[in-house]
Image (tube, rainbow, N blue to C red):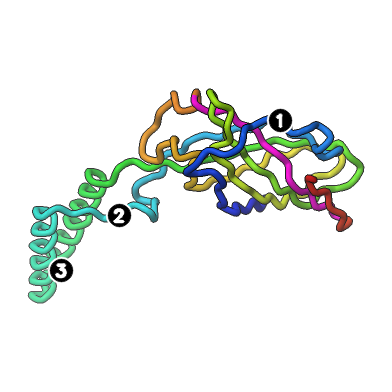
Amino acid sequence: MKTLALLFLVGFFAAFSSAHPLAQSQDPPDLVVLKFSWAKERIGWERDPFSPTIENYDDVRTRIRDERRLEDAKRSGNKAEASKLERLARMNSEARSRQTTPPRYGFIYKISVKNTGSKTIKSIDWDYVFFDADTQNEIGRLKFSSEEKIGPSKSKELTLSIHRPPTETISVNELNSKERTTLNERVILMRILYSDGSVWQRP
């Protein structure tokens, strides 16, 4: 499955128009959204390319001291001491990263759809839309494009992991189970490309 994120967020920093359900006649006649969900996923500090390296004065002084000792050991030809100092430097670096790098979360967005028509589907454009639970105003929209072959009467789950949260109210640095209570959400199908080249487009 090849799922591409357009990474375009509408209303990320502002509230938009009132979120009234679109007329049922605007939905595609042959593709049904069975369920949808999103979740946070902890990003490992050692794999996160967005994690900065943060050093205080003592860290810098310790690192420079270790580097000098390592250079002295290499220069003197003491391979055993050099190997020992390299291992120690790696351990110190990893320990500093664990202490200074805050936890960070990615976001997983999933939808399950069923092709109820007679034509094979080639790709789907879909929006994951978020509303304020109190005002019902739209406050966030993620636009996705999923290239996925779905035959007649077949169902598929489309999954995408990105760093973008649903709205600015959702933290990327901490896990808060109560965040969901502030949001309502829905998935809107925007465009369907069929294997025969025909297209359905939301009016």
Q: Which residue is mark 1?
A: 21
Q: CA distance from mark 2 to mark 1?
A: 42 Å
Q: Disc 3 to disc 2, how far (Cα)? A: 32 Å
Q: Which residue is mark 3?
A: 79
| Pointer 2 residue | 52
Mark 3 residue crowding within 10 angstroms, few (<14) / some (14–19) / many (20+) = few
Residue closest to the eye, 11 or 87: 11
* Rendering coords of residue 194 (x, y %): 84, 52
Amino acid type shown at disc 2: Pro
Q: Nearer the viewer, residue 16 or 96?
A: 16
Q: Amino acid at mark 1?
A: Pro
Residue 153 seen by the camera: no
State the residue at coordinates (81%, 38%): 26
How many numbered callouts? 3
Residue 24, placed above or below residue 146: above
Residue 55 location, quadrant: bottom left
Would residue 64 be found to the left or right of residue 7 on screen?
Answer: left
Q: Residue at x 53, y 23 (%)?
A: 134
Which residues, given as a range, are shown in magenta? 182-195
Query: SS of the residue at dot 2?
Result: loop
Coordinates of residue 5 in the picture (x, y in percent): 60, 52
Question: Which of marks 3 and 1 precedes in the sequence?
Answer: 1
Question: Whole-percent x and y of residue 87?
Answer: 20, 57
Tell me the amino acid under the disc marked 3: Lys
